[in-house]
Structures are given as structure tokens and as C-alpha cells.
Amino acid sequence: PYRLGDIVVRSAYNECFTFLFMPLVLLGLLYLIENDKRKFYLFFIIGCVGLLYSHLVITMYFAILLIPFVIIYHKEIFKKENFIPLAISCIIIILLSLPELLPMLEHKLSTEYMVYVKNYMTNIDYMNIFNNHLIDYVKILSDYSWDIPFYINHIVITMLLVRLFFFIKNKKKDKIEIFLWIFTLLAFFISLNCFPWKAVPEFLYFIQFPWRMETMLTISISLLAPLVIKN
């Protein structure tokens, strides 16, 4: 429902494209771990470039939430044979993204572009107002003409909780599922009204609306919930 709200209520079409490109980045990294360099280049480069052109702030947050993935798979990622593919892909991503990055840098250096004016586009008040409460994820309103549907399908929530039960119970845990649960919990926590925004660097305020983290939350949930059929 949140994605539909992004399209119909907010007309945030660029933000909607991130639903496509974030999984591609993750898929590319998994192919790197599996030593399939051709598919790594394809998915990782398309995913990163697509993200950068779609929404810079969500790209930044997605990169931050990928840190647990890098930690979990550090031995597989930072092998000698992966350094050149990683360097080549980063160079290609930067070159393909220059039409987006150079104008942004020009605005930053040559003018008082409002995005970079402190407390103009966003501030601590935004963080404390535009967030979610726990009830928002389960409560269904009667009219969404002017409201974004934050609730998560109750069947999906049930599937997710059942999967979490078996994940905790299972002694042998898959690395990718460990990462997805960490990713989900972090995105969920950042979106909530209890997140300590005063304790984090101010550049993170660029997200403007913490409930935007549901963009990432819906992706990880859509990957985790179907795993219940494994049990």
C-alpha cells in the first residue's frame, strides 16, 4: 500500500523507482560473492546508477543500511580477485552518474541552493513530526484521499512473524537472511517516533520524512515473508 500511496497520493514517481533498483544492487553483490563477475557488473551498475538518478537521499540511506551486509560478507567481498571488479564498477557508476552529480555539485559550489541552507529544507522538527508510530503499521484508515497508507498487509505481518519465529528457532542461520532481518529492524526503527534524531549527524536529516524508510522496509519484508513456506 505504501508504494501505491507514493504514486497516487504523493506523486513521488522518482522515489518509486528505488523499489526496482535497490534489489538489483543487492543481487549484484550476491553475484560478486558467487564469483559471477558478468552478472555482478550488470546488476550492480544498473542498480547503483538507477538509484542515483532516482533519489539521492534514499541512495545514501540504502548505502548505510548495506554496512551490515559488508560486515557479514567481508571475507567474500574483500578478496583480491574482487578488487578490480569493484574498482571498475565504481568508475563506471561515477561516469554514468555525472549528468546527475555535476549539476548538483555546481549548485552546491556556486549558489545558495536551498537544499543546502541549514534548517531550510529540513530540521529536527521535521524528524519529530514526519515519522511513524507503531499503530500506523497496522491501522487501516477509511479514506486515503490525502493520506499515505503506511499500514502493512496483516497477512504479510503474520507471515513475517511466523518466519521470525522459525528463524530464531533454527540453529543454522543463512547469512543473507541474517542481513535481511538486520536491514528490516534498522529501517523500521529509523522510521519510528522513538528514533533518537538528536544523537545522529545532521546530514541524515536530509531524509526529511523518516517514514520514507518504509520504502526500504517494504522491500526487505517482501523478501522475508515468503520464506515462511520453507517451514
Image: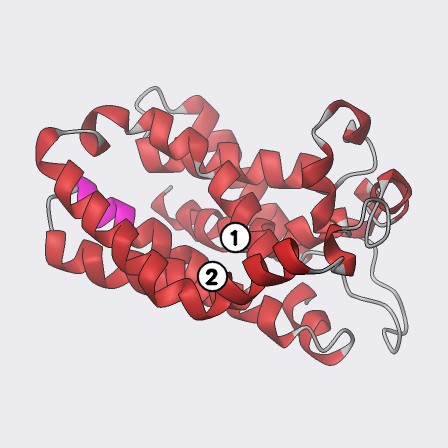
Mark identifier at residue 59: 1
**Is 86 above or below relative to 27?**
above
- Specify the quadrant that holds the N terminus: bottom right
Whether residue 73 is in magenta: the answer is no
Q: Badge 2 local density, few (<14 within 10 Å), some, or many (20+)?
A: many
Picture residue at 73% right of the left edge, 71% below the top: 5
**Is 80 above or below relative to 158?**
above
**Is 216 above or below relative to 169?**
below
Mark identifier at residue 51: 2
The answer to whether residue 141 is visible is: yes
Give x and y (percent) for residue 50. 42, 66
Q: CB atoms at circles 2 and 1 under 8 Å apart?
A: yes
Residue projecting furthest to the front: 110
**Image-based side of 94 in relation to 182, left or right:** left
Start and end of the magenta stretch? 29-33
Give x and y (percent) for residue 178. 41, 31
Give x and y (percent) for residue 200. 71, 27
Picture residue at 12% right of the left edge, 52% below the top: 37
Picture residue at 49% right of the left edge, 61% below the top: 101
Counting residues from the N terminus, which is met first, the one under dot 2 or under dot 1? 2
The amino acid pointed to by label 1 is: Thr
The answer to whether residue 24 is visible is: no
**Image-based side of 100 in relation to 204, left or right:** left
Quarter of the figure with residue 9: bottom right
